[in-house]
Image: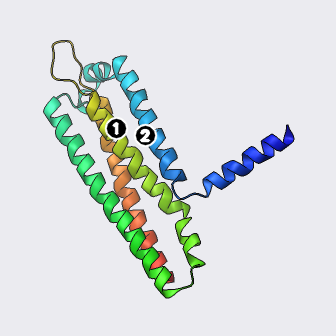
Amino acid sequence: MKNIIVSGFEYLKKLESKIAFYPTVYSLVGVGFAFFMFYIENKGVSAYLMDHVPLLVINNTETAFSILTTFIAGLISIMVFSFSMVMVLLNQASSNFSPRVLPGLISNKRHQKILGIYNATLLYCIFTMVSIEPDGDKYQLPGFSVLLAIVLMVVCLGAFILFILFLKKFKCII
């Protein structure tokens, strides 16, 4: 029994060292959060907030679609730029230094977590946009979910600024 537990922890440690571990975990959290918000929206949180704090809820389908599609396009652009910068950094490090430097750069948890934040927000926005139905008499737009998408996008912009600062620091090291 002890060997199974020890081998399980060793496997998790080995899995955590992979480059796609944190982006995958964060992406799953983003999808799970989107489904959780879909469940909460079906319970009427947007209708409740619309009655009590209408400023917090987006109640126009076209506006919600516009916001979410803009966020999706912007996040894809940010992700392409970020992945490209990581590749440029790795290329520069591999051409200037020994190959032993590359695993240290690839396994940087900060970069992986920031890319995971991008993935989670992108998937959250996609699933939230898919959950929006056409206007109807008894349909309540998931306005609170769109508000949370706005908050997550602000977090992504902050993460992007941190990412640029980390790259600048790494570029000085290299």
Question: Residue 156 appears at what percent x and percent y?
Answer: 37, 53
Instruction: Check disc 2 and give the amino acid type.
Output: Gly
Question: Residue 48 appears at what percent x and percent y?
Answer: 31, 19
Q: Quadrant of residue 36?
A: top left
Q: Quadrant of residue 104?
A: bottom right
* Vertical position of residue 88 compared to residue 152: above or below: below
Residue positioned 80% across, 46% down in the render: 6
Residue furthest top in the image:
138
Towards the viewer: 98 or 166 = 98
Q: Name the image colouring.
A: rainbow
Question: Residue 84 appears at what percent x and percent y?
Answer: 35, 68
Instruction: Check disc 1 and give the amino acid type.
Output: Leu
Name the secondary structure under disc 2: helix
Residue beneath disc 1 = 148
Residue positioned 36% across, 25% down in the render: 38
* Vertical position of residue 174 compared to residue 134: above or below: below
The N terminus lies in quadrant:
top right
Q: Residues within 10 Å of mark 1 (few under 14, many from 20)?
A: some
Q: Is residue 139 left or right of residue 39?
A: left
Residue positioned 57% across, 84% down in the render: 98
